[in-house]
Structure formats: C-alpha cells, structure tokens
C-alpha cells in the first residue's frame, strides 16, 4: 500500500526527517528507509531505460550495455567483468538503465524534489519525495538472495554479491519474476555517489509498474507530496543546512549551478 502525505508547512517535514527506528541489538537509532525526490509530483517511478526505450527496453538493453562497455573500457578496463558495474557506471553518466536512484538521506531527496532546472516553474507545481522500506523489499526476495544477505549481515547487495547470485540480466529477471527487486549499494567511484548517499533499486524488466508493485506488496511506502507554495521555503532552508548543488555535484559545474540558483531573481522582482 502506498500512503500519501502532504507537506503544507515546514513543521510537516519533521516526521520525514526524524523517522529513525531504535535497534535494540545495538541500542542505537538507525534509518531503514530510502528516499527519492522528484521535481514534479505527477512524475512516476520509472527507470531511464523504460522512459527512453519504452516497450523495446528488453530488446535494446543488451545493445546499450555492450556498446557502452566497448567505449567506456578506456576509462575503466575492468568494466567488462560485471554487467552490474557496467550498469552503475553508465547510470552515473546518463546511460539509460534499469537502475532507479535512491538516497539514504531524506535531505538529499528533498534537494532533488525542490530544485528545478527551470526555476520559473518552482511555484507552478507540487513536488514529491518517495520513501521505501528496505526491510520490506528484502522480505520479498527469493530465498537464495535473502540467505546471501543474512550471511553477509546486510540488507543490501554489493556489486560482487549480486554478481555471484545473478551474473547475467537474464538470470536476474528469471529470479525476480517481476515480483521483487534488489537494493544495490554502488561502489564509491566518485565523490558524487558518496555525497548523495546513493543506492539503487535494480528493477526487473518484468515489473511493468513500480508503483503498482509497491502498492500491492508493501505496507510502509510513503509518497510525500510537497505543495508548490512550500518549495522555495524548503529550498532556502536546505541551503542553510549546506544541502545544495555545490555538495550534491562536487566540482565547478555544481558550484556554478548552485550560485546561479542562489542568486536567481524571481519575475515579480524584475523592477527592483
């Protein structure tokens, strides 16, 4: 079931930002959730390969990865050893893949939700932060995947772990049957992945609708809809908390994007 929560006041953010759970085994508080922010509440949860290749995604995916690997080998000669490493590197650089980006930080998700490429649209539409429960996704996995996680004392997969259980895309899709998906922790190939606290869900191509899957098989999925009137308020708050393009995209590109937005002048101030 997907629960929808509307954010109409700054105070409404508090549950999203403080929803850690107490772990009795270590007497500490930990967050079992992943978050994904989108600048438009009407945008669905859809992978870039499904958005780009539509009904031909399954047929075109091998060609996309094969050609990417052929040309990307100059950057990473080991890339041919794992289809999952190919996919992560490709996703990181804009390649259409079956991976869906998430963060363990609700602040990072909020950053993506309340930031627009076209800043004039900030007050024209609601945005959204999705929340997933990692433990719920783990419980839906085939037994051998759950056993692998238990043996590794983890709720997520590394590239090496996933390569051992599913060395090919065909094997992964056969195992998942469209009714489960792995949470994958990417290697720290650059500071952007580290700063964004990045994780991926590996969406099997047999899963026609991620939202239908979550609505049917999960109980703790939440869709936080942030009303358009709150977007600039939250955006300015995140800047104060040092959550901005400067941190999310380390380097001069991120710095320049942050400065352009920070000094953006709204249209109704054009005569000042």
Image (cartoon, grey):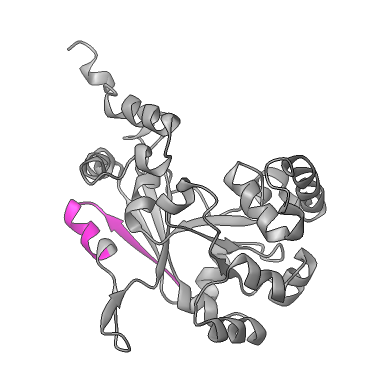
Q: Is residue 177 visible?
A: no
Query: Percent x, y for residue 17?
Result: 26, 61
Query: Looking at the image, which residue is at 61% across and 56% down?
Result: 99
Q: Which residues are magenta?
A: 1-15
Query: Percent x, y for residue 126?
Result: 36, 45
Left or right: 17 with respect to 143?
Answer: left
Classify the position of the C terminus by image quarter.
top left
Quarter of image, res 16? bottom left
Query: Looking at the image, which residue is at 36% across and 42% down?
Result: 247
Quarter of image, res 75? top right
Query: Looking at the image, which residue is at 63% across and 63% down?
Result: 203
- As drawn, 155 above or below 7: below
Left or right: 229 with respect to 32?
Answer: left
- As drawn, 28 above or below 4: below
Left or right: 12 with respect to 53?
Answer: left
Query: Percent x, y for residue 263?
Result: 27, 24
Query: Percent x, y for residue 182?
Result: 59, 70
């Amino acid at each position: 079931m997907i629960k929808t929560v509307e954010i109409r006041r700054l105070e409404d953010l508090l549950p999203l930002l403080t929803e850690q759970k107490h772990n009795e085994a270590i007497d500490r508080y930990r967050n079992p959730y992943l978050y994904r922010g989108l600048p438009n509440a009407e945008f669905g949860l859809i992978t870039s390969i499904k958005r780009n290749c539509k009904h031909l995604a399954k047929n075109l995916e091998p060609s996309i990865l094969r050609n990417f690997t052929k040309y990307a080998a100059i950057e990473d000669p080991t890339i041919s050893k794992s289809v999952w490493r190919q996919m992560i590197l490709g996703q990181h650089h804009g390649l259409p893949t079956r991976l869906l980006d998430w963060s363990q930080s609700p602040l990072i998700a909020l950053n993506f939700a309340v930031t627009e490429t076209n800043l004039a649209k900030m007050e024209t539409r609601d945005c959204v932060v999705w929340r997933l429960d990692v433990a719920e996704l783990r419980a839906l996995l085939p037994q051998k995947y759950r056993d692998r996680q238990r043996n590794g004392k983890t709720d997520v997969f590394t590239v090496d772990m996933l390569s051992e259980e599913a060395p090919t895309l065909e094997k992964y899709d056969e195992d998942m049957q469209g009714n489960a998906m792995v949470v994958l922790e990417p290697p720290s190939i650059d500071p952007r992945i580290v700063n964004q606290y990045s994780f991926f869900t590996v969406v099997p191509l047999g899963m026609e609708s991620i939202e239908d899957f979550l609505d049917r098989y999960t109980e703790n999925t939440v869709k936080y809809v942030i009303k358009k009137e709150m977007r600039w308020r939250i955006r300015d708050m995140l800047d104060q908390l040092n959550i901005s393009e400067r941190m999310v995209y380390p380097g001069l590109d991120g710095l320049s994007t942050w400065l352009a937005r920070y000094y953006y002048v709204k249209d109704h101030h054009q005569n000042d």
